[in-house]
């Protein structure tokens, strides 16, 4: 008998149903979260004694991804801290200067929080080059060169700072999810306090842009348009 399309489809279907797979992916029980947290602690202890080659041969899991994320953010936060003074110096609106200055102080706290998380996990605090934040901050510098001191200068600073905040929000949100799945409640709490400040900083920047900064910058465009009209008539 010839094989029908339906036969082929059912042969290709894995034995386990989609429903079972979904159940596997459901939130882990408190017991399994606790077991995972213990595994993270014991793996961190054995890692210290392993050679680089042994490490490479290891299977990479969620705890490794969390560790990578922490190192990535340790690099990013320190670079953001060093980059903010340029933006603060170029900003003209006093409220924007104040918001950026306050967030730079918070950024110092974020660096210290990451160090505390490394300590909790028994991992040495180490930065890992993050191409994403390098790209965002390089672009911010170019934007500042082009727009700094112009009518759109403050809008441009918020444009760049917003990209930084959204990057941080994305990374901290993901890492909180990893900590949660791994049963690392204290890590979750610490990263959550940073995430709350990143969200607040982003909201403040958006409010300032929408409240007055974009409107003030757009006056220049209106004047330019009016001038062009007069010239044409
Ligand atoms: Fe931060
Ligand atoms: Fe931030």
Image: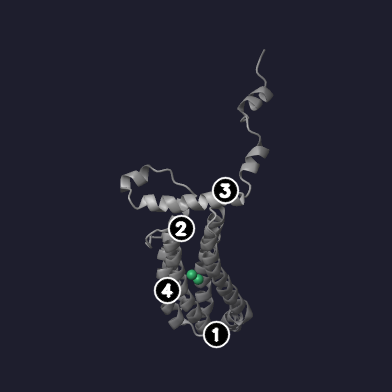
What's the distance in space between the residues labelled 3 and 4, CA to CA? 38 Å
The quarter of the picture where the C terminus appears is: bottom right
Outermost residue, bottom side: 94
Which callout, 3 or 4, points at the residue further toward the start of the chain? 3
Residue 24, image x and y in percent? 61, 42
Q: Secondary structure at mark 3?
A: helix
**Residue 32 — which label?**
3
What element does badge 4 sit on? helix
Give the labeled residue for mark 2: 69
Q: Which residue is mark 1?
A: 95
**Where is residue 162 shown, x and y percent of the image?**
53, 70
Q: Position of residue 36 (x, y in %)?
A: 52, 50
In percent of the image, x 43 and y 83: which residue is there? Answer: 89
Judge from the rendering whether residue 108 lies leftward or rightward of residue 197; answer left or right. left
The numbered mark at residue 33 is none
Instruction: Find the distance from the CA under tag 2 to the CA under tag 1.
Output: 32 Å
Circle nearer the N terminus (2, 4): 2
Q: If the image is split into quadrants, where does the N terminus sit? A: top right
Q: Disc 2 and disc 3: Cα gap in Å?
A: 23 Å
Side of 20 where 186 appears, left or right: left
Which residue is labeled 4 in the image?
81
């Amino acid at each position: 008998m010839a094989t029908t399309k339906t036969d082929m489809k059912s042969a290709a279907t894995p034995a386990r149903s989609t429903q079972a797979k979904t159940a596997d992916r459901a939130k882990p029980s408190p017991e399994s979260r606790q077991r995972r947290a213990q595994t993270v602690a014991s793996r961190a202890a054995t890692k210290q004694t392993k050679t680089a080659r042994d490490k490479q041969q290891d299977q990479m899991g969620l705890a490794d991804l969390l560790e990578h994320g922490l190192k990535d953010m340790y690099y990013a936060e320190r670079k953001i801290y060093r980059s903010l003074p340029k933006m603060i110096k170029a900003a003209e609106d006093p409220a924007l200067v104040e918001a950026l200055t306050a967030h730079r102080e918070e950024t110092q706290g974020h660096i210290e929080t990451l160090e505390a998380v490394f300590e909790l996990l028994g991992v040495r605090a180490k930065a890992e080059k993050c191409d994403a934040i390098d790209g965002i901050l390089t672009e911010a510098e170019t934007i500042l060169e082009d727009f700094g001191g112009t009518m759109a200068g403050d809008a441009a600073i918020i444009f760049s700072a917003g990209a930084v905040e959204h990057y941080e929000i994305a990374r901290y949100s993901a890492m909180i999810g990893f900590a949660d799945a791994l049963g690392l409640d204290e890590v979750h709490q610490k990263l959550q306090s940073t995430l709350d400040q990143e969200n607040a900083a982003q909201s403040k920047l958006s409010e300032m842009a929408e409240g007055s900064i974009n409107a003030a910058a757009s006056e220049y465009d209106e004047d330019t348009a009016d001038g062009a009209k007069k010239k044409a008539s």
